[in-house]
Amino acid sequence: MAHPDDEALLCYGSLKKFQLGGAKIHITFLTNGGQARDIVTPNVAKSLSANYKILDFPVSNLSMNKNLVTSIEKQIDMIRPSMLITHTNSLLEHQDHQIVSKASTLAGFRSKYVNTILHCEPVLRNTGFSPNLFIDIEKYISDKLQAITLYRNVLDRWYMHPEIVTTRARSWALQVQNDSSSLGYCEAFEIHLLRY
């Protein structure tokens, strides 16, 4: 992830679901996010029983280069994840999100450990994101909102408001709902690698 708070906004419900299913969660942030976001990160990570690391690249000044990709590759080699979740590479995304998406996807494709690469929904809805995986987070929506609230205490943005978050999650659920299902909330992803 590019910044602390991205994990809460984009994929917290899925991470919680994976964690409760037995997965070990590791989160790597390429920057500290600025604006004291990293002060909240230990509490959010604890709520996921997750390990995390902040690599401290400069906020809003990332560039796609060998140093960035190598740093991500080192994290992958140390953690050995089977799944990598990163940002989508949409032109309307924050520049750090775009760079992290490219660098993480490249590092994941090169890894002998990563079998799945998922791109999260963008912070801002746009037409460049075409999800093909919807994860039911109905049981975890309140946990997601609590995690986002921790970050809202230091950085309050319009897209962090509970009504926005729940409306987005509900809209994804409605896209995959049929007569026999009753999904209330989903997080959406693009599958960029699936090798088994």
Image (spheres, helix red, strand yellow):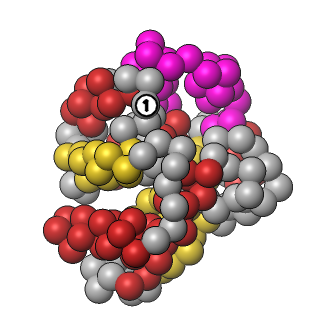
How many numbered marks, from 0 up?
Answer: 1
Q: Quadrant of residue 78?
A: bottom left
Viewer-nearest residue: 136 or 98: 98
**The residue tagged with tag 1: helix, strand or loop?**
loop
Which x, y percent locates residue 79? Answer: 20, 65
Q: Is residue 133 left or right of residue 31?
A: right
**With respect to residue 93, does 48 lie above or below?**
above
Instruction: Please name the residue shown 64% across and 41% down the image.
Output: 123
The answer to whether residue 193 is above or below residue 183 is below
Query: Amino acid under label 1?
Result: Gly
What is the chief secondary structure element of the magenta stretch? helix
* Image position of 132 with respect to 142: above or below: below
Q: Position of residue 117 (x, y in %)?
A: 47, 70
Residue at x-position 33% and y-position 82%: 111
The residue lying toward the viewer, choosing from 24 and 185, is: 24
In this orientation, which residue lies closer to the viewer: 53 or 60?
60
Locate residue 20, reporting x and y percent. 27, 45
Region in magenta = 141-170
Query: Is 97 on the left-hand or right-hand side of 20?
Result: right
At x 43% / y 51%, what residue is drawn? 1
Q: Is residue 84 left or right of residue 50?
A: right
Extreme residue toward the right, this view: 127
Q: Check the picture and name the quadrant holding the C terminus.
A: bottom left
94 part of magenta stretch = no
Q: Is residue 85 above or below residue 4?
A: below
Residue that label 1 marks: 34
Residue 186 figure quarter: top right
Q: Is residue 116 visible?
A: no
**Residue ID at (46%, 71%):** 65
